[in-house]
Amino acid sequence: MAPLPQRKGTALPAMEKKVTAAVAALFLVFFLLILFFWNLQVLNHDRYQRLADNNRIRIIQMPANRGIITDRNGIILADSTPDYSLAIIAEDAEDSPEETVLALANLLGREGTTAVGRFREDAARTPYRPVRVFEHLDEREVALFETLQDRFPGAVLLVVPRRYYPFDKTTSHILGYVGEISEGQLQSGEYPGAKRRDIVGKFALEKAFDRYLRGTDGGRQVEVDARGREISILGVTEPTPGANLSLTLDIRVQQELEEAFGEEKGAGVVLGARTGEVLAMVSLPAFDPNEFSLGLSRERWNEILTDPDHPLQNKVIQGIYPPGSTFKVVTAITGLMERVVSPGETLFCSGGYYYGGRVYRDWKAAGHGIVNLRKAIVESCDVYFYQTGERAGIEAMAKWGSILGLGKRTGIDLPGEVEGLLPSPAWKKRVRKQPWFPGETLSASIGQGYVLVTPLQLCNLYSTIARRGVRMDPYLVHRAVKEEGLELYRRDPMVSQETEIPQDVWNSIIQALEGVVSDPHGTGRAAGIPGYRVAGKTGTAQVVRLQETPSKEEDIPYRLRDHGWFAGFAPVEKPMFAAVVVVEHGGHGSSTAAPIVSRILKKSLEFYPPETGGERGPKEVR
Amino acid sequence: MKLFRKLDPVPLLCAAALSSAGIAVIWSATRGSAYAGLPSRQGYWLLVAFAAFFLGYFADRRHLERGAYVFFGGVLAILIALLAVGKVSAGVQRWVHFGGLNFQPSELAKIALILALARYFSRLKTKPPYGLEEISIPLLMVAGLALPVALQPDLGSGLLLGLISVPIFFFAGIRRSAVLVLGLGAAAAAPSLFFSLKEYQQNRILNFLNPERDPLGTGYHVVQSKIAIGSGGMFGKGFQQGTQSQLRFIPEQHTDFIFSVLAEEFGFVGVVLVLGLVLFLTLYLLGYLEYAKTKFAVLVVVGLSCAFAIQTSINIAMAAGLLPVVGLPLPLMSYGGSSLVVTFLGFGIVAGYRRRR
């Protein structure tokens, strides 16, 4: 240490004291500085080391592709396409990230203020995470950004797979749609393994099979500099794409069915009569699932939600309608099984049935005259079934209806299926707190009143008839297979119940149903297909009970018109396809629904001729 | 060589050691960047700085005292001229260009102020301690230099001019009452001073007072500097191994925040070595008071030694987040010729008093 002044006679008084004070102050300042650095560098080293690592090491997500969905012939129904988004890493944007957002908006010719708003909302969450500000860039925008990228520090181009449905509306209710997971869904645990911002299936198969379709995201661990440029890659985990689904659906049949509806609304379904496979399932009006992949605006979402036609509802499994005359097969089977009628027995129909102090009218005011079971089904005589129902009783109809699969879910692999309703006195007591009135049995026996079915239940019922009592559960998804061929899920046709209804009952019922289409007086003649034997039944579901019967259908307001049904299968001798169509407010089933069923069964038989083994034959591609 | 026989090599060696360490850290901080040529340029500046040391060392003491006011006036004139017509670069006018050289006159202002204050107090007829009446002129001197510098705008250097005059006033002797009045005056003037600042300067002060205010804006620099220092640990990450510096997370890392780079790469051990050397050098220079025979000499030795220690402490405290960031180089180590040359010149002047024994 340098010698400090000791001698007397220095130039200033009290020098020693002042020097001592100055030296003490110096020591104090430097001691405090060293103490502070000790605290930073030694005591808090771990914390700052971690922060330094967070600074330089980033995980860049590599989102996994969602599994592809194909129809039974391998035609792609849902795919992933690359979708470009512009994101900002706030920490990398030099001065003001918000100014960068506005400059980018200017460059792309997009609206800037909402993007800034989005950015603000999101920027504070995780440091160094890119915040998406502009989505779904087209090629021109991508090229524009890439050439001028250097002007926008902190801006990065993200490639995210976007779900794409090549048949858009045609497959909407079957495939559903995808979207960003909501906070509520994240908390609920219904999407195991999903992270914030993940794209998940939100509806129909996309939702029900989400855990198969959703892959595992990968990531790259990279070292970056202060401007966010990648310096080196420290590690890579490749993303694992989700499993591919192959469906039982045939997109050609699906398209045909949708087209056959024309402008009409309603629902239609085609089942493989021997398998329970769903070949087509149409609910109209539909929605465009691609709209959802692009991200819906709030206004558009509200518009869809409040649409009086409920485009988001899959009417095949969620629409409940009175089955009308299509239910008469259940009454007939009940009557035969309970031995209250026999095929040969005849009744007289005068156009109405007097019961409990009032007249239950037949749809044909002049009456059908002498009717047996066959004629009753062929001409859809109400009086015959009033009496059959009255004799058998509501309990028996509920019993046989249930055996035939009504009043309960079919178990199809789509979410949201409803049960329909097969009424019984016990049900009415429980739910309506009222006793069962005998007259209600009469309404039920012709498929009115409380009875409610979904088109799928009805189609399942007619398939069961085609199989002569063997019940099979309908299904849509055949397999879920990982890219490397590992099968995660498989479903094959399976018998769920063999009803103990004897063959002679089936003979009577099926012959009568064939008569509906083939007899000169049959109500379902419009369902006929040249060269094939078709069986089926028309139905008219009352929307409201009108006080007076208007003379003409056109006089009734559209919303009050009845729904038209047709349920049938073909070919009769060796059934291959069963189809059900309900045309909402279509009036009589014979005029609206029957031609659609005819067209779709004909097309299905064209695609899968019975001679070659049908849809299970060698032509089938999987 | 007779001239150099009496030369005490210690201050020169210490300063050279710190400057060389500085060049090494500048090298590490600019490696692979557009500034990669700066370490060698700093090397040339070091040669100029040695010349400046001997300029101060051999300068005639009487000329030093007599020329103090002239020098002061010259620097003041340059500063004002710079404000008026100085080259505007990004709102900052700090440089004098002549030939190929750029020089920051605000650095020279430190020496000009110290010499002028020393001369003023050494010629006072009255006995200390001095009251407000006697110190009003030196206060005007301080303000006269600090104001144009702060307006450049170089707030840090302006404030520094005020701070380095404190030891001179202290050694000259001031009455307590005068200190009290000055303190109250400063407190009263602070708000109006604050509102006369540029917006970014105000933000820096507000962010210092509340770092949460804007973690991604101006507060970001301090956060990154602290991360660099803290992650250096006991022994540092190694020369050129600092992730914060090599990946350019540290702002102004070859100038104002050079100490953060040093702390990251050489750790607490490096910090203590440098701080110890700075303290040793300051105390060693203060030791030259033994040879200071006149009041002027005492005040010059005190002023120059303490200025070095004060600026070093403030810069380091800024890097560690203890003071608001106002932009001030670390003497001897930051990149920048003006600062290096002027610091050596000051050491030369102090060392010269030993020669004159």
Image (cartoon, rainbow, N blue to C red):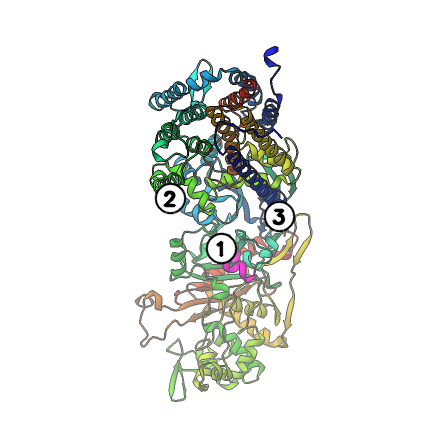
User: Tag 3: residue type?
Assistant: Pro
Nearer-N-terminus badge (1/2): 2
Give how far across and how far down residue A364 sits, in percent: 39, 76
1 vs 2, front mark: 2
Is residue B59 or residue A275 the one in the foreground?
B59
Q: Is residue B210 left or right of residue B281?
A: left
What chain letter is assigned to the residue under label 1? A
- The residue furthest bottom is A357
Residue A507 falls inside the magenta stretch? no
| Label of residue A172 in the image | 1
What chain letter is assigned to the residue under label 2? A
Q: Which residue is mark 3?
A: A241
Answer few, some or many: residues within 10 Å of disc 3's Cα (few below 14, many 20 plus, some between 14 and 19). many
Q: Which residue is mark 2?
A: A113
3 vs 2, front mark: 2
Measure the alpha-carbon separation of dots 1 and 2: 33 Å
Give how far across and how far down residue B158 sits, in percent: 41, 31
Kindly tell me whether residue A89 is visible in this rendering: no
